[in-house]
Amino acid sequence: MSGVLLWVVSPKENANSLLSLMPRIGSPRRSKLCSRLTFSTGVLAYSGAVAHPARSSEEMVYEVVLKQAALVREQSRVKERALDLDERIETDGLTNWDLLNQAYDRCGEVCAEYAKTFYLGTLLMTPERRRAVWAIYVWCRRTDELVDGPNASYITPKALDRWEKRLTDLFEGRPYDMYDAALSDTVSKYPVDIQPFKDMVEGMRLDLRKSRYQNFDELYLYCYYVAGTVGLMSVPVMGISPESKASTETVYNAALALGIANQLTNILRDVGEDARRGRVYLPQDELAQAGLSDDDIFRGKVTDKWKMFMKGQIKRARMFFDEAEKGVSELNSASRWPVWASLLLYRQILDAIEANGYDNFTKRAYVGKAKKLVSLPVAYGKAVIGPSKLTKQLVSR
Ligand SMILES: CC(C)=CCC/C(C)=C/CC/C(C)=C/CC/C(C)=C/COP(=O)(O)OP(=O)(O)O
């Protein structure tokens, strides 16, 4: 990660860069999710629509959601891309099919190493879906490592451009290594679009040049880039239940909300750690409204003002988790359990921040083993409840 380089993104600039990457879909209507998450609670007085009359980040991201949902409905594009990995990978005593299996197994090992609980959850999925999820996970992890891993201080925007080129190549059936080969195979089999992947690389670029977020609109866009995208990548692989009456957009919205909720939680948990690296992800305008500044964060004292501020932030993160919960039951039955498990576990980090007396400067909020163990059967219980019986009209936005 680069040092403290203050770089303010104008929402207009973001809009242009994001829009240039995607076709316009329908009318730019504002999602209900956006309006419901636009609230004013004394401490938090955020309104994307008011602050940026042009277009808010939520509106822009919603367009990506619509595009992803449309792709899943069509599915046809998968057939268009005749990727034949069997022909591309060199044989070496092994059949190409063996090599691909090995590539997926390696992805599984990485997933098992770095995301144990999630890995266990994926074991409940069908073997095809499970390995596709692993391949996506590994790509996201490698992308994140570029700016957060041991070589992060050497990473440049040029290196990210090369990583993006490599991404385009793998989507076109030209993988560079075995992890890429696994993902290349996955994207040829499921209606996974390149846009969320590109947007994640964009998130890494943002992280390189920006260490402050002026308002929630800016932070929302960052959260979409680095985590909401994971939700959008996952749905086509996890699959929507054939019994689901919900609209595809509803499910994608929930997946997006889960990514945002996780990232907001991550940010709230790591305030002290990030501050020590010169980074403040919390919205500057909301800090100011609460009578706080960066200095208060660097000082790291838990005051009444800080507690009030944190209560508002936690409340908002919970709203995103609530939004996400509405969509989990619409997923394929085998995908619901791991998603519920990770949702419940991550959500409890917010409870842990409260239990720490809102001291996220010196204490790292975590969910203990016992609580984790209890969450698994709870998640299982929730997962057996299938899709909502509501009609399409009622649940769609
Ligand atoms: C809800 C529906 C319909 C579908 C689920 C769609 C999915 C899988 C969404 C999940 C999105 C996700 C996992 C985003 C990543 C967010 C995040 C902050 C991960 C944290 O990663 P690490 O930094 O490794 O975390 P720790 O620091 O806690 O280990």
Image (spheres, rainbow, N blue to C red):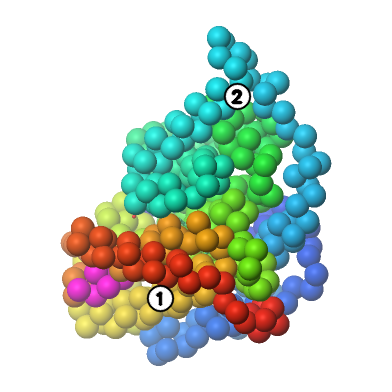
User: Does label 2 point to a residue whose CB lies under 8 Å from ligand 1?
Assistant: no
Residue 101 on the magenta span: no
- x, y (%) of residue 250? 62, 71
Quote the CA–CA distance across marks 2 and 1.
44 Å
Which quadrant of the view contains residue 261? bottom left
Tag 2 residue = 97
Residue drawn at point x = 24 percent, y = 69 percent: 352
> In this view of the protein, which residue sits in the foreground, 4 or 184?
184
Is residue 13 left or right of 144 when viewed as pictured? right
- x, y (%) of residue 216? 49, 72
User: Which numbered disc, 2 or 1, marks the residue closer to the eye?
Assistant: 2
Q: What's drawn in magenta, residue-wise? A: 350-355
> In this view of the protein, which residue sits in the foreground, 184 or 239?
239
Residue 352 on the magenta span: yes
Which quadrant of the view contains residue 20? bottom right
Q: Is residue 71 visible?
A: yes
- Give the residue type that dot 2 points to: Trp
Residue drawn at point x = 53 percent, y = 70 percent: 386
Element under disc 1: helix
Tag 1 residue = 318
Query: Is 235 placed above or below 177 here?
Result: below
Residue drawn at point x = 57 percent, y = 27 percent: 100
Q: Is residue 284 visible?
A: no
- Give the residue type that dot 1 points to: Arg
Quarter holding ligand 1: bottom left
Q: Residues within 10 Å of mark 1 (few under 14, many from 20)?
A: some
